[in-house]
Image (tube, rainbow, N blue to C red):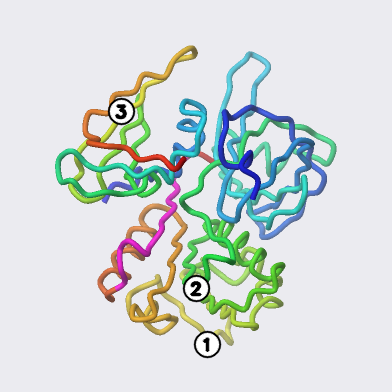
Amino acid sequence: MARAAISGRLTWQLAEAVDVLTETPHVKTIAFDVADWAGHRAGQHVDIRLTAEDGYQAERSYSIASAPNGTRLDLTVVRIADGEVSPYLADELKPGDRIELRGPVGGYFVWEPPQGGPLLLVAGGSGIAPLMAMIRLRAAAGSDVDTRLLFSSRGWDDIIYRDELERLNGNGLTVVHTLTSSQPPDWTGYARLVDAEMLAEVGPSPAERPRVYVCGPTPFAEAVTEALVHLGHDPQGIKTERFGPTGG
Amino acid sequence: MDKLMLDGNAVAGLLQEVFAAEMTTAIGSCATCHATDPVGATHVYLGAGIVLRCPHCDNTLAVIVRDERRAWITFQGIRALGLAL
């Protein structure tokens, strides 16, 4: 890992959109190329800055969803109807357009294969993004670290990265979905909010001392963390990244 | 539980802008309850200013207020801050 990637003063860089992918009806992934990108670690994020014609600026943070891959990075954006930033990113941005971005940022909510496992990843909605970077890095590195992903989505069509997760399932990775609002007619999986019983079934047990990463909206992250501690998981082994109801 | 509560990850960019170092892995100890945690694990509230609170006792660790030219930071509730060299 290059030292330059984690330390030093942050500067705004131009990022060029190179690809736009529709993930779900409300979610898109935008692939950017950043000429001087120093590389990133799985779990880090970037700050994005949009400037209006009158000089008004809006900043938002987005987790990097891709594994380290040269100067390319993928950001997954949920379109918030009354948001200041996400409607532009999700609806307007086309390949060839440029935005300002700085990063990579963060170092706490990071996992890399040498850290080992077992891993318990718990995602609520777009909270999957930084965890997907870890899952993609794990696959790219050929790691077979015992990894359980418990992924909470509203419905089947709202599952971000659904097909890719299905492909990656196996080789020590177990993907478990819970669909909280609507389920397909033949659904046999979980159909409720994440709770202690579900976390105990998905495992690993506290005795296995998993590294736990929880990412989702604040109420989700709080409920999951509380349930994990209730089950006996070491609070120090649980890393949480919360995002708020606004922002978008 | 406050739905608007975030965590130290949410201010990673601002802190790195100010300190020119990755700060979410810096370890801070709370002046009130003496618990030690990475900055990334602190509770963060964004408003007119940014407030970092201890995840154990809710003590205010630090307050950051910024304008276009400066960031003003008070470390009123941090006893010590350890950064990796």
Which amino acid type corresponds to the residue marked 3 in the rendered image? Val
Q: Residue A234 lies in magenta, yes or no?
A: yes
Task: Give percent across and percent down for residue A81.
Answer: 57, 42
Task: Give percent across and percent down for residue A237.
Answer: 37, 64
- Of circles 2 and 3, the one toward us is 2
- Discs 1, 3: same chain: no
Which amino acid type corresponds to the residue marked 1 in the rendered image? Thr
The chain ID associated with circle 2 is A
How many numbered markers are drawn?
3
Residue at x 51%, y 76% (from the top left corner): A148
- Discs 2, 3: same chain: no
In the image, farthest residue toward the left:
B32
Numbered badge on residue B63: 3
Give the magenta part as a residue range: A233-246
Of A116 and B63, the residue lying toward us = A116
Q: Is residue A200 visible?
A: yes
From the image, tell me which residue sits under label 1: A188
Q: CA distance from mark 2 to mark 3?
A: 36 Å
Residue at x 56%, y 49% (from the top left corner): A44
In the image, farthest residue toward the right:
A96
Q: Is residue A47 shown left or right of residue B83?
A: right
